[in-house]
Amino acid sequence: MTVLTHAASGWTIGTGKPLSVIAGLNVLEDEGLALEVGTELKRICDALGLPYVFKASFDKANRSSIKSYRGPGMEAGLKTLARVKAKLNVPICADLHEPGQAEPVAEVVDIVQIPAFLCRQTDLVVATARATAAAGGIVQVKKAQFIAPWDTKNIVSKIAEAADVGVILCERGSSFGYNNLVVDMLGIQEMQKLGCPVTIDATHAVQLPGADPRTAGASTGGRRDGVAIIAKAAIAAGADGVFLEFHTDPDKALCDGPSCLPLSAANDLLATLKALHEVVAA
């Protein structure tokens, strides 16, 4: 049995616990939108009895084009996330990209996320593990699109050697080129064998990298209709939590709009995922 608890908030994930939800915006656009989305998702999760974490990136450093919107940056973004955290009284999840960001990010962010493309960067992994452990947080590692699920053992080992900190592994699909991603649901249990809870990033799993027809390939496309399919399949396969991105108007989202869901879809999807999780757990 593997269970992680965030000491300060009581948020839990793992065997025998309710479905854990990490959900919010892809990237911070403005504080008003963050509060609107976070407030609604918290309301839904509270009503369903699901432990909730608000997520949003302050910087999307891995973009298809240099002209793509990246976010407000670390300094301004962390201030916004701190205000959202205080106003909604929820834990926060956000990613980082450089070792020097680890300490300031861990001071605000409760679940510090290592992006998929960077999960083998030793300096980043070690710095994140140590800073997050010191702050009492949890590390979530996105499985790289180019490694097998069982090879995440090396990342888990690096973190364990660096610090005593809880680790969540996140499945987000594998890339074989050709502007597509494929999710192997058998990989979820393979990663759980490493002693870590596993989440499914159903939003990024439906991306079509470099294939957005709106920009002639200068941004990432997506198959929004596939998000619920991937999420339901992963929960049926035993995932401990779900990672989702919403927007009040996805077609106007400043980043990855084709992959995110309308906020109005959150209640029905999370209710379905809760029911599936309960069936699997039973």
Image: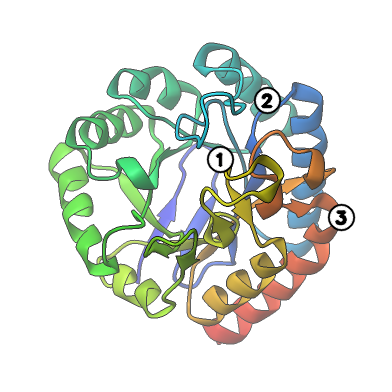
Mark 1 — residue?
9
Q: Is residue 233 above or below residue 174?
A: below
Is tag 1's residue or tag 3's residue first in the polypeptide sequence? 1
Mark 2 — residue?
86
**Residue farthest to the left?**
161
Residue at (27%, 36%) from the top-left corner?
129
Is 158 or 219 nearer to us in this picture? 219
Element at label 1: loop
Q: Quadrant of residue 135?
A: top left
Looking at the rendered structure, the kind of residue marked 3 is Ser
Is tag 1's residue or tag 2's residue first in the polypeptide sequence? 1
Is tag 3's residue or tag 2's residue first in the polypeptide sequence? 2
Looking at the rendered structure, the kind of residue marked 2 is Ala
Mark 3 — residue?
264
Element at label 2: helix
* Labels 1, 2: front one: 2
Number of other residues with Cα within 10 Å of mark 1, as a class: few under 14, some 14 to 19, many 20 or more:
few
Looking at the rendered structure, the kind of residue marked 1 is Ser
Residue 15 percent across, percent down from the top left: 44, 71
